[in-house]
Image (spheres, helix red, strand yellow):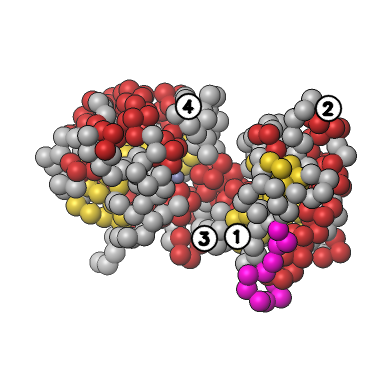
């Protein structure tokens, strides 16, 4: 029997460097993970430079590369992907931003960059959508709330560029910055003017909104200014189904990853209780993925928590979360009709609390795979595997070949 489906599990930021608190082991090599080790033993293993050797990827550029889209051609900033993740349909050429609700004083100083970690800002975003008018620029906009204090802004109009700065001063007690074109060209200058006008009009709407009056009465920080960053232009991305001739879905708590999926036409599957953190409902994600594969050829699942522990420098927490992931993956051992890929998108080493260019471990397991001698899923063991060292852009072609869906090159 040849496997005819692909289950692609991305363990975000899973790999690491030797951690002193773990006696020089990485969280992955210190964790007890019988399921991942069994999958490694049954599959072929290797290490992977998601983009290329020595390049330190973001989660966005990494996932684009893993899905086979060249980030150097398609990526100008995180904003448009966040917009897609917030449910805004982005057309090529539209400009997208990640936004935060924040608190500004009457004197115009930023008091709280996250507006008291407000949640449920839908009514505030609706008031902005209703009240702000950018028509004098010939620009339409969509403003949508995301999780917590987050939101997304999309601009549509002629002659807009994406090379603009942020108004986020990145610290409290100072005034928000004026947004400027970072490249001296009319289209970028126009976007900067539109953004400044957006903030100028949105701020009084937020100041006077009943939700914010109520928050102030209760001693909470009002969400009365929008900070924006991550400007990017929506690229043309060939739809996944046209590119590969297979159907697919995306399962992720992170709006960025959902947005990348949506941007290439992969619908998002909702799973209750997923948080993008170490308390996420990982078994729910795996169950949803297995269910989804009944009707789809391809599912990509992002499991985020280990990346968060890496950013926090918490090696023991990261090790423990890997053990949680491992037990959630148990149902995969019985999956026989699909090619299972398990890998990281980048390393997030606890000693540096950020992403690094260290290659990530990979397993490909399923019918027809030439197995190797690797019996453990970690950075050191996988480096000895039969896949050797590959780049992220090779994964989809390898997987498609294993399900006999790749095109022959030549006669
Ligand atoms: Zn990541
Ligand atoms: Zn990260």
What residue did someone put label 3 on? 75
Of tags 3 and 2, the one toward the viewer is 2
The local secondary structure at tag 2 comes to helix
Cβ–Cβ under 8 Å for marks 4 and 1: no
What residue did someone put label 2 on? 217
As drawn, the label of residue 280 is 4
Q: Quick one: label 3 or label 2, which is nearer the N terminus?
A: 3
Instruction: Report x, y in % for residue 343.
Output: 32, 42
Q: Main secondary structure of the magenta part?
A: loop
Q: Residues within 10 Å of mark 3 (few under 14, many from 20)?
A: some
The local secondary structure at tag 1 comes to strand
What span is colored magenta in the figure? 177-187
Residue shown at 43% from the left, 41% from the top = 311
Q: How far apart are the two marked residues, 3 and 1, measured between alpha carbons?
A: 8 Å
The quadrant where residue 308 appears? top left
Cβ–Cβ under 8 Å for marks 3 and 2: no
The local secondary structure at tag 4 comes to loop
Residue shown at 62% from the left, 51% from the top = 170
Q: How far apart are the two marked residues, 2 and 4, measured between alpha carbons?
A: 34 Å
What residue did someone put label 1 on? 232
**Foreground of the two, 151 or 141:** 151
Query: Is residue 183 within the magenta segment?
Result: yes
């Amino acid at each position: 029997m040849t496997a005819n489906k692909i289950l692609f599990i991305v363990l975000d930021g899973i790999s690491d460097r030797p951690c002193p608190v773990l006696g020089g082991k990485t969280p992955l090599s210190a964790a007890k993970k019988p399921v991942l080790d069994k999958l490694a033993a049954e599959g072929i293993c290797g290490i992977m430079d998601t983009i290329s050797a020595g390049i330190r990827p973001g989660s966005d550029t990494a996932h684009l590369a893993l899905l086979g889209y060249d980030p150097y051609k398609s990526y100008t900033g995180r904003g448009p992907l966040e917009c897609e993740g917030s449910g805004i349909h982005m057309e090529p050429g539209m400009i997208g931003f990640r936004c935060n609700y924040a608190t500004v004083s009457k004197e115009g100083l930023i008091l709280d960059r996250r507006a008291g970690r407000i949640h449920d800002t839908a009514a505030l975003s609706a008031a902005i959508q209703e009240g702000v008018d950018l028509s004098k620029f010939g620009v339409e906009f969509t403003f949508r709330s995301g999780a917590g204090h987050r939101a997304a802004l999309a601009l549509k109009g002629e002659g807009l560029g994406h090379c603009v700065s942020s108004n986020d001063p990145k610290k409290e007690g100072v005034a928000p910055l004026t947004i400027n074109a970072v490249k001296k060209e009319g289209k970028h200058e126009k976007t900067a003017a539109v953004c400044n006008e957006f903030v100028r009009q949105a701020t009084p709407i937020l100041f006077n909104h009943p939700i914010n009056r109520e928050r102030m009465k209760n001693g909470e920080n009002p969400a009365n200014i929008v900070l924006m960053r991550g400007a990017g232009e929506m690229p043309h991305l060939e739809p996944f189904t046209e590119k590969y001739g297979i159907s697919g879905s995306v399962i992720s708590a992170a709006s960025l990853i959902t947005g990348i999926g949506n941007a290439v036409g992969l619908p998002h599957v909702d799973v209750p209780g997923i948080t993008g953190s170490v308390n996420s409902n990982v078994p729910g994600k795996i169950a949803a993925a297995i269910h989804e594969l009944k009707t789809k050829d391809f599912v990509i699942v992002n499991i985020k928590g280990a990346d968060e522990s890496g950013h926090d420098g918490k090696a023991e927490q990261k090790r423990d979360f890997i053990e949680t992931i491992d037990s959630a993956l148990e149902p995969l051992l019985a999956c026989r009709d699909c090619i299972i890929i398990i890998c990281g998108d980048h390393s997030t080493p606890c000693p540096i609390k950020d992403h690094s260019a260290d290659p990530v471990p990979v397993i490909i397991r399923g019918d027809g795979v030439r197995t190797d001698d690797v019996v453990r899923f970690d950075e050191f063991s996988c480096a000895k595997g039969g896949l050797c060292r590959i780049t992220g852009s090779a994964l989809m072609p390898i997987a498609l070949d294993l399900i006999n869906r790749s095109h022959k090159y030549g006669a």
